[in-house]
Amino acid sequence: MRIAQVAPPFEPVPPRLYGGTERVVSYLTEELVRRGHDVTLFASGDSRTGARLVPVVERAVRIDPSTRDALAAQLVAALGKVFKRAREFDVIHCHVDYPAFPFGSLVGTPTFHTLHGRLDLSYLRPLFQEFAGERFVSISDAQRLVVADLRIRWAGTVHHGLPLARYPFSPEGGEYLAFLGRIAPEKQADVAIAVARRTGMPLKIAAKVDPNDRAYFERHVAPLLDDPLIEFVGEIGDAEKPAFLGGAKALLFPIDWPEPFGLVVIEALACGTPVIARPCGSVGEILEHGRTGFLADTVFDLADAVKRIDEIDRAECRRVVERRFRVERMVDNYEALYREALEERRAA
C-alpha cells in the first residue's frame, strides 16, 4: 500500500526527548516500511525515518524558537502538502487531531484520524458533530466514553504498541520509585512526591517542564525538591529511558485527567516494572490491577500499594506487554483498518 503518515510538527519523529504521539508515529511508520509498504512521512525536517520524508517545517516547532505559530505550521505546511498529493496515496493517516478533520471529506483517498488527546473539551463537540463521518480511531475504548452520545464514525480502537527490543527486561528492578513524563497539573508530580514521602522510598522524577506549566512547577513541585528522598532528573530521551524505568521498583502514575492511553505505563511494564496509578481514563483498560500493578485513588492508598509492590511478578508485566502491546500487533490492527477502507472504496 502507498501510505501517508502525517505527524505533528511540534517534535521530530522520533522525538529526541519527550513526545508520545511522535514516538508512536515513528514505531508505526518504521514497522510499515519493514513490511514492504510504500510509506511517506510528513513531519519536521529533523525527523529520522526509513520512509520517504517530506519536511513540513525545517525543524520541530518546540526545538526551533523562531517558530511561534504552531497551528499555522500544522495546517498550512503539513495538511496542505499532504492533501495536495492525496491521489498519490491509497491511505492517508493523520495524527494531528482536529485541524485535519475538514480535509478527509475533500479527497477520495480514505483518510484516518487517530485521536491522541483528551476528548472531553467543550470546543471539540461541535467539531465532532460537523465531521462525524470521518474515519476516527481511538487509542483506547475509554477515550471514547466522553463523546459516546455523539454519532461518530469510529473505524476502531488501536492500542499503542512498542518495539520490545528497545525496552530490555529488568528482572530485579531497584529500590526507587520513578515518575516519567511531563510536569503538569493533570500529571500530579506533587502527589507522587507525597507518596514517596509517606513510604520513605526515594523518588526519581524524569520530566520536562513546558512554559505553560512553569507556574505549576514553581508553585507546587519545586518547593518539594529539597527533600533528600526526591531527585529531579529532568527530561530524558530514549537512550536513558529503559535503564531509568527498568531500575525502578515501581512507576508512579497518579494522574488526575481522562488519560487517553498512557504510553509510559506500557514502557514501564515492558521493562518489568509494575505501575501504581489512579484509575483515570484508560488506565484501568491498560493496567491490570493486582497483576501488573495497582489502582488506587488517595495518597494513602497509593502509598499502601507501594508497600505491596513485591506481590507483582515483574516477568508477568513483561509477558502482558508481549501479548497485548507489541508494535507488531498495533500495526496488524492499522493494516486491517486500511484494507477495510480500501475494500469499501472499491465496492463503492
Image (spheres, rainbow, N blue to C red):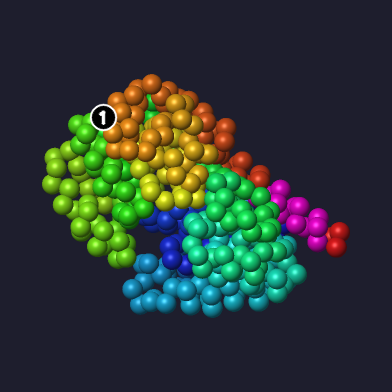
* Direction from residue 159 to residue 174 in the image, left or right: left
**Residue at 30% across / 28% down in the picture?**
304
Res 50 quadrant in image: bottom right
Nearest the eye: 93 or 276: 276
Q: Nearer the viewer, residue 98 or 313?
A: 98
Question: Which span of residues is magenta-colored?
Answer: 334-345
- What residue sits 66% from the left and 76% below the top? 84
Name the quadrant of the N terminus.
Answer: bottom right
Q: Nearer the viewer, residue 52 or 278?
A: 278
Assign the magenta stretch its main secondary structure: helix
Residue 3 % position (x, y): 66, 60
Toward the top, the furthest residue is: 311
Q: Residue 288: x, y in percent? A: 49, 32
Q: In this rendering, would 215 be left or right of 23?
A: left
Residue 115 is situated, as x and y percent measured from the top left of the image, at 56, 57
Query: Does residue 281 show up magenta in the picture?
Result: no
> Is 335 in the magenta?
yes
Figure check: 196 above or below 104: above
Residue 231 visible: yes
User: Is 102 rendered above or below residue 175?
Assistant: below
- Within 10 Å of the Cα at label 1, are there few (<14), some (14-19), or many (20+) other Cα atoms? few
Quadrant including the C terminus: bottom right
Q: Secondary structure at mark 1?
A: loop
Q: Is residue 222 left or right of residue 123?
A: left
> Residue 93's x, y, as percent?
63, 61
Q: Which residue is mark 1?
A: 175
Given the image, on which type of amino acid does mark 1 rest?
Answer: Glu
